[in-house]
Image (tube, rainbow, N blue to C red):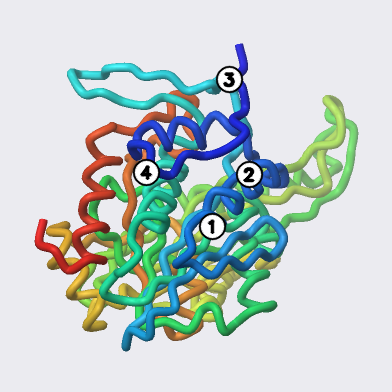
Amino acid sequence: MPAETPTSLDLSADSVALTRAICDVPSVSGDETILADLVESALARASHLEIIRDGDTIVARTNLGRDRRVVIAGHLDTVPINENLPTRFETVDGVDHLWGRGTVDMKAGVAVQLKLAAELTEPIVDVTWMWYDHEEVAAGLNGLGRLAGNRPDLFEADFAILGEPSNGHVEGGCNGTLRAEVRTTGLRAHSARSWVGENAIHKLAPALTRLVEFEAETVEVDGLAYREGLNAVVVRGGVAGNVIPDDAVLDVNYRFAPSRSLAEASELVREFFDDYEVTVVDGAEGARPGLDAPLAQQFVRAVGAEARPKYGWTDVARFSALGVPAVNFGPGDPLKAHADDERVALDQIRSTEHALRAWLTGVAR
């Protein structure tokens, strides 16, 4: 039975209760308006914050005249629901969890950020809080990207934190990603007389064998080891059950270390399939860890979290491209993001809140 959509958000509530309330407001990409309205309305009661709205992206910032500014961001949208709302509490291996869509990716992080934004009236740095739409879909729709185009001044900062799930660890930077199409052509024929045709699907066999035998690199970047990956993700081809296909396409995804540019990664893929027609159809630069920035080092020490690499692409790359060092730090196991049994440990929600609160107020944990 669907949960009743709340008419308001209580930002004074416990961060676990707030997470549950936010998750029970469905906000699949493209349908974030109701949640964005609730967020804007709740933050409007915080007199220490300047509120700015761009579409379904909400920005709240302090203007205390501090000598340093930090951006802390999280996305409001989720992937589609699959019978995993409303949320519920469950215990797994003796650990209490909140189960349901968005609990990991990334409404627990959003809840922590909202609570702190409302309560911390005197942080030791000025803070720009961002909650944005359309993260889980095509990059061209991303609310953070749109905001950077409309209001680049809001991204002026010394350091940024993205609340993506990281199991409570600090994950520096992120891998880059690209998708390429490897295409073959042939000649149609009746399958009963296949020898007079050329099977385009069969021509992909050497490319697939090459991928199976490929050993991905682990590349150290600024002290963190980024594991790469080159994989077939989609195969398309075929005309009918009795026709030799004359066209086939293999979609390949390359996750590359942030030491490589998108152009270099694209050239590597073209060289790897040098005897095929290759078209790079989508790609995004990675982001170096940025852990050499003084605020980043201070943050890692303050939260007492181990610094690790981020293998997946995240919006830290947008901050990195603007010259702002950025890390991922949020509650939840990334392996449970988008899963039908998505769930977050309650202790991780609370510990993330405590860590961020301690750092932003200068109080040791």
Q: Which mark is residue 334?
A: 4
Q: In the rendered structure, are the residues bearing label 3 and label 2 in contact, judged by CB atoms less than 8 Å apart?
A: no
**Disc 1 residue type?**
Trp
**Disc 2 residue type?**
Val
Secondary structure, mark 1, is strand
For marks 4 and 1 on the same chain, the one whose residue lies earlier in the sequence: 1
Q: Quadrant of residue 143?
A: bottom right
For marks 2 and 4 on the same chain, the one whose residue lies earlier in the sequence: 2
Viewer-nearest of discs 1 and 2: 1
Q: Quadrant of residue 68?
A: bottom left
Query: Who is closer to the viewer here, 191 or 283?
Result: 283
Q: Tell me the residue at 17%/59% (across/down).
A: 303
For marks 4 and 3 on the same chain, the one whose residue lies earlier in the sequence: 3
Residue 24 position, x and y percent, is: 54, 29
For marks 1 and 2 on the same chain, the one whose residue lies earlier in the sequence: 1
Q: Which mark is residue 234?
A: 2
Q: Residues within 10 Å of mark 1 (few under 14, many from 20)?
A: many
Quadrant of the rendering where the N terminus is positioned: top right
- Quickly name the residue at label 1: 131
- Quickly name the residue at label 3: 3
Viewer-nearest of discs 2 and 4: 4
Residue 97 position, x and y percent, is: 31, 26
Q: Tell me the residue at 17%/68% (across/down).
A: 362
For marks 3 and 2 on the same chain, the one whose residue lies earlier in the sequence: 3
In space, the residues marked 2 and 4 are separated at their CA atoms by 23 Å
Q: Quadrant of residue 91?
A: top left
Q: Residues within 10 Å of mark 4 (few under 14, many from 20)?
A: some
